[in-house]
Image: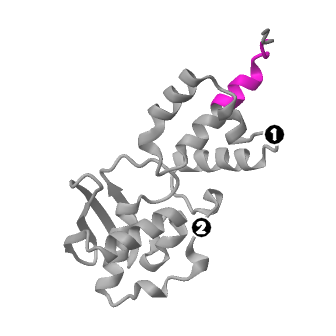
């Protein structure tokens, strides 16, 4: 779904928005080229490499974004958000003019544009509504090997919601299986 460049924050999680601002502040975004229909940039990553971001425009609206980073969380990745923000800065936008209301702390409040993201958004809503799911209590109840394996497997994804989603799916699977009595 197309959106105005300035409205990118509606598609960006609070943590991601703050990291995008930091990337622009630290001059980690290089606009390679941009015109009325297209923009591309390189954004430095944490490991000294770069991610390539593509943005397409139609009638002054963003109609497509792509970043080659591994982020698969809710909303835009920090590299795409930083690239959009850098385009605004080039047009004279002041980073300090971002309002506190533009920081979205609940992932269910993020505007999405594809079916995969909508499914994830529905699952996040389910997690938020499940009064019996306590992430920390559930993880604390797992044995050390299971927990370390789980955390190690998803450590790379700590920037998005997948750790919580995967823990919740694990939790739901455990709830559907009868509990085993533990004899000491």
For the point 45% across and 60% down, which residue is it? 76
Q: x, y percentage for residue 127?
A: 71, 45
Q: Is residue 165 left or right of residue 160?
A: right
Q: Choose between 71 and 121: the one closer to the eye.
A: 71
Q: Is residue 173 left or right of residue 81?
A: right
Q: Circle 2 sits in a helix, a strand or a loop, which is it?
A: loop
Residue 147's place in the image compared with 78, above or below, is above
Badge 1 crowding class, 10 Å Cα cut-off, few under 14, some 14 to 19, many 20 or more, is: few
**Is residue 172 in the magenta section?**
yes
Name the outermost residue toward the front: 184
Q: Is residue 70 visible?
A: yes
Name the outermost residue toward the left: 32
For the point 57% across and 24% down, which residue is it? 144
Q: x, y percentage for residue 95?
A: 41, 83
Answer with the quarter of the image where residue 30 lies. Answer: bottom left
Name the outermost residue toward the top: 183
The chief SS type of the magenta part is helix
First along the sequence among labels 2 and 1: 2
Q: Circle 1 sits in a helix, a strand or a loop, which is it?
A: loop
Residue 143's place in the image compared with 71, above or below, is above
For the point 57% across and 63% down, which residue is it? 111
For the point 72% across and 37% down, which residue is it? 137
- CA distance for labels 2 and 1: 24 Å
Residue identified by numbered label 2: 104
Q: Is residue 172 left or right of residue 62?
A: right
Q: Is residue 81 left or right of residue 115?
A: left
* Quadrant of the frame with the C terminus: top right
Q: Which residues are magenta?
A: 170-180
Q: x, y percentage for residue 10?
A: 54, 70
Residue identified by numbered label 1: 132
User: Which mark is on residue 153?
Assistant: none
């Amino acid at each position: 779904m197309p959106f105005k460049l300035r409205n990118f924050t509606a598609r960006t999680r609070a943590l991601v928005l703050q990291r995008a601002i930091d990337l622009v502040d630290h001059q980690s975004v290089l606009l390679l080229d941009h015109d009325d229909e297209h923009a591309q940039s390189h954004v430095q990553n944490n490991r000294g490499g770069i991610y390539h971001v593509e943005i397409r425009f139609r009638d002054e609206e963003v109609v497509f974004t792509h970043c080659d980073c591994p982020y698969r969380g809710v909303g835009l990745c920090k590299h795409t958000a930083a690239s959009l923000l850098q385009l605004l800065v080039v047009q004279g936008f002041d980073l300090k003019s971002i309002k506190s209301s533009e920081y979205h702390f609940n992932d269910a409040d993020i505007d999405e544009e594809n079916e995969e993201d909508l499914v994830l958004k529905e699952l996040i809503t389910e997690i938020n509504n499940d009064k019996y799911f306590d992430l920390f209590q559930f993880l604390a109840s797992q044995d050390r090997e299971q927990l370390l394996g789980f955390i190690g497997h998803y450590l790379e994804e700590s920037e998005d919601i997948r750790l919580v989603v995967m823990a919740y799916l694990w939790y739901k699977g455990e709830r559907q299986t009868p509990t085993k009595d533990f004899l000491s």
